[in-house]
Image (cartoon, rainbow, N blue to C red):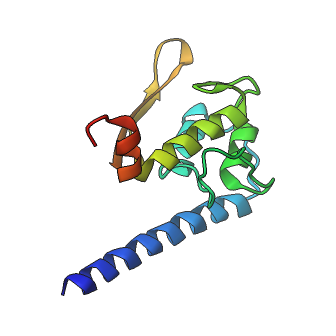
Amino acid sequence: MKDKEAFLAKEVDQMRDEIRHLERMKFLASKEDLTGTSPLRLVAEYFNLLRHGLDVQDLDGSTPLRLDKDHAQKRYLQRVMASDVASNRGFGVQALLADWRSLSLRHDKLELALAKLDYGAKDVVVADAKIYTTESQNACSTRYLLV
Protein backbone atom coordinates (compact mmCIF):
# COMPACT_ATOMS: atom_id res chain seq x y z
CA MET A 1 0.00 0.00 0.00
CA LYS A 2 2.85 2.41 0.87
CA ASP A 3 4.51 1.71 -2.48
CA LYS A 4 1.31 2.69 -4.25
CA GLU A 5 1.04 5.88 -2.17
CA ALA A 6 4.63 6.80 -2.96
CA PHE A 7 4.08 6.09 -6.64
CA LEU A 8 0.92 8.23 -6.73
CA ALA A 9 2.61 11.06 -4.84
CA LYS A 10 5.45 11.02 -7.37
CA GLU A 11 2.96 11.02 -10.25
CA VAL A 12 1.09 14.00 -8.74
CA ASP A 13 4.37 15.92 -8.38
CA GLN A 14 5.25 15.20 -12.01
CA MET A 15 1.81 16.36 -13.14
CA ARG A 16 2.19 19.58 -11.12
CA ASP A 17 5.56 20.19 -12.78
CA GLU A 18 4.00 19.65 -16.19
CA ILE A 19 1.14 22.04 -15.37
CA ARG A 20 3.62 24.72 -14.27
CA HIS A 21 5.58 24.25 -17.46
CA LEU A 22 2.43 24.47 -19.62
CA GLU A 23 1.26 27.60 -17.80
CA ARG A 24 4.59 29.27 -18.51
CA MET A 25 4.46 28.17 -22.12
CA LYS A 26 0.95 29.62 -22.38
CA PHE A 27 2.28 32.94 -21.17
CA LEU A 28 5.13 32.75 -23.66
CA ALA A 29 2.67 32.14 -26.48
CA SER A 30 0.70 35.28 -25.67
CA LYS A 31 2.04 38.20 -27.65
CA GLU A 32 0.30 40.69 -25.38
CA ASP A 33 1.75 44.20 -25.50
CA LEU A 34 2.43 45.27 -21.93
CA THR A 35 2.36 48.99 -22.71
CA GLY A 36 -0.27 50.64 -20.55
CA THR A 37 -0.65 47.63 -18.25
CA SER A 38 -1.23 48.67 -14.64
CA PRO A 39 1.68 48.24 -12.23
CA LEU A 40 -0.53 46.03 -10.04
CA ARG A 41 -1.12 43.66 -12.98
CA LEU A 42 2.61 43.53 -13.77
CA VAL A 43 3.48 42.66 -10.15
CA ALA A 44 0.69 40.06 -9.97
CA GLU A 45 2.04 38.42 -13.13
CA TYR A 46 5.56 38.43 -11.63
CA PHE A 47 4.31 36.46 -8.62
CA ASN A 48 2.29 34.17 -10.89
CA LEU A 49 5.23 33.32 -13.15
CA LEU A 50 7.65 32.75 -10.28
CA ARG A 51 5.28 31.15 -7.79
CA HIS A 52 7.16 27.81 -7.96
CA GLY A 53 10.64 29.23 -8.44
CA LEU A 54 12.71 29.38 -11.57
CA ASP A 55 11.71 26.94 -14.30
CA VAL A 56 15.01 25.34 -15.30
CA GLN A 57 16.00 21.74 -15.71
CA ASP A 58 19.62 22.25 -14.63
CA LEU A 59 19.69 23.72 -11.14
CA ASP A 60 23.40 23.14 -10.64
CA GLY A 61 24.53 26.26 -8.81
CA SER A 62 28.14 25.86 -9.90
CA THR A 63 27.54 26.53 -13.60
CA PRO A 64 26.59 29.89 -15.09
CA LEU A 65 22.85 30.35 -15.57
CA ARG A 66 21.97 30.05 -19.25
CA LEU A 67 18.37 30.39 -20.34
CA ASP A 68 17.37 30.46 -23.98
CA LYS A 69 15.79 33.59 -25.42
CA ASP A 70 12.32 32.02 -25.34
CA HIS A 71 12.37 31.21 -21.61
CA ALA A 72 9.05 32.68 -20.39
CA GLN A 73 10.21 33.92 -17.00
CA LYS A 74 13.37 35.50 -18.41
CA ARG A 75 11.44 37.14 -21.23
CA TYR A 76 8.89 38.60 -18.85
CA LEU A 77 11.52 40.02 -16.51
CA GLN A 78 13.41 41.53 -19.43
CA ARG A 79 10.20 43.18 -20.62
CA VAL A 80 9.06 44.67 -17.31
CA MET A 81 12.09 45.19 -15.07
CA ALA A 82 14.49 48.09 -15.14
CA SER A 83 17.86 47.06 -16.54
CA ASP A 84 19.45 47.94 -13.19
CA VAL A 85 16.93 46.15 -10.95
CA ALA A 86 18.61 45.29 -7.64
CA SER A 87 18.78 41.77 -6.22
CA ASN A 88 20.86 39.90 -3.66
CA ARG A 89 23.43 38.98 -6.32
CA GLY A 90 23.82 42.40 -7.90
CA PHE A 91 21.98 44.37 -10.54
CA GLY A 92 20.04 43.40 -13.62
CA VAL A 93 17.66 40.69 -14.75
CA GLN A 94 20.43 38.07 -14.94
CA ALA A 95 21.28 38.65 -11.26
CA LEU A 96 17.59 38.42 -10.32
CA LEU A 97 17.28 35.13 -12.24
CA ALA A 98 20.38 33.83 -10.45
CA ASP A 99 18.69 34.61 -7.11
CA TRP A 100 15.61 32.66 -8.19
CA ARG A 101 17.78 29.74 -9.31
CA SER A 102 19.48 29.71 -5.92
CA LEU A 103 16.09 29.57 -4.17
CA SER A 104 14.92 26.79 -6.46
CA LEU A 105 18.12 24.85 -5.84
CA ARG A 106 17.79 25.02 -2.06
CA HIS A 107 14.12 24.09 -1.85
CA ASP A 108 12.54 20.90 -3.18
CA LYS A 109 9.13 22.50 -3.32
CA LEU A 110 8.62 26.24 -3.36
CA GLU A 111 5.33 28.08 -3.55
CA LEU A 112 5.09 31.83 -3.47
CA ALA A 113 1.51 33.00 -2.89
CA LEU A 114 0.48 36.61 -3.34
CA ALA A 115 -1.68 37.46 -0.32
CA LYS A 116 -2.35 41.16 -0.88
CA LEU A 117 -1.44 43.68 -3.56
CA ASP A 118 -2.12 47.40 -3.28
CA TYR A 119 -0.69 50.85 -3.78
CA GLY A 120 1.25 52.36 -0.91
CA ALA A 121 2.46 55.94 -0.52
CA LYS A 122 3.53 57.79 -3.68
CA ASP A 123 2.26 55.07 -6.05
CA VAL A 124 4.59 52.43 -4.63
CA VAL A 125 3.24 48.92 -5.17
CA VAL A 126 3.11 46.93 -1.93
CA ALA A 127 2.91 43.14 -2.23
CA ASP A 128 2.36 40.88 0.75
CA ALA A 129 3.31 37.32 -0.04
CA LYS A 130 3.48 33.99 1.72
CA ILE A 131 6.16 31.44 0.97
CA TYR A 132 5.65 27.71 1.45
CA THR A 133 8.63 25.44 1.04
CA THR A 134 10.12 22.05 1.66
CA GLU A 135 13.86 22.04 2.19
CA SER A 136 15.91 19.23 0.79
CA GLN A 137 18.20 17.16 3.02
CA ASN A 138 21.11 18.53 1.02
CA ALA A 139 20.02 22.12 1.77
CA CYS A 140 19.64 21.33 5.47
CA SER A 141 23.05 19.71 5.69
CA THR A 142 24.74 22.75 4.15
CA ARG A 143 22.81 25.22 6.27
CA TYR A 144 22.59 23.60 9.69
CA LEU A 145 25.60 22.25 11.55
CA LEU A 146 23.77 19.45 13.39
CA VAL A 147 22.23 17.81 10.32
117 vs 47, nearest the viewer: 47
In this rendering, position of residue 107 left or right of residue 92 = left
In this rendering, position of residue 54 left or right of residue 82 = left
When the figure is inspected, residue 103 is found, relative to residue 84, above or below; the finding is below
**Residue 103, image x, y percentages:** 50, 42
What residue is drawn where x is 75% and y is 49%?
66
What residue is drawn where x is 76% and y is 47%?
33
User: Is residue 136 shown to the viewer in this render?
Assistant: no
User: Is residue 117 shown to the viewer in this render?
Assistant: yes
Image quadrant holding the C terminus, namely top left
What residue is drawn where x is 50% and y is 67%?
17
**Residue 58, image x, y percentages:** 63, 57
How many labels were placed on the picture?
0
Image quadrant holding the N terminus, namely bottom left
When the figure is inspected, residue 91 is found, relative to residue 27, above or below; the finding is above
1 vs 55, nearest the viewer: 1
In this rendering, position of residue 66 left or right of residue 54 = right
In this rendering, position of residue 135 left or right of residue 56 = left
**Residue 70, image x, y percentages:** 78, 57
Q: Quadrant of residue 4?
A: bottom left
Q: Residue furthest right?
A: 69
Q: Residue furthest top?
A: 122
**Residue 111, image x, y percentages:** 40, 50
28 vs 10, nearest the viewer: 10
Q: Residue furthest front?
A: 146
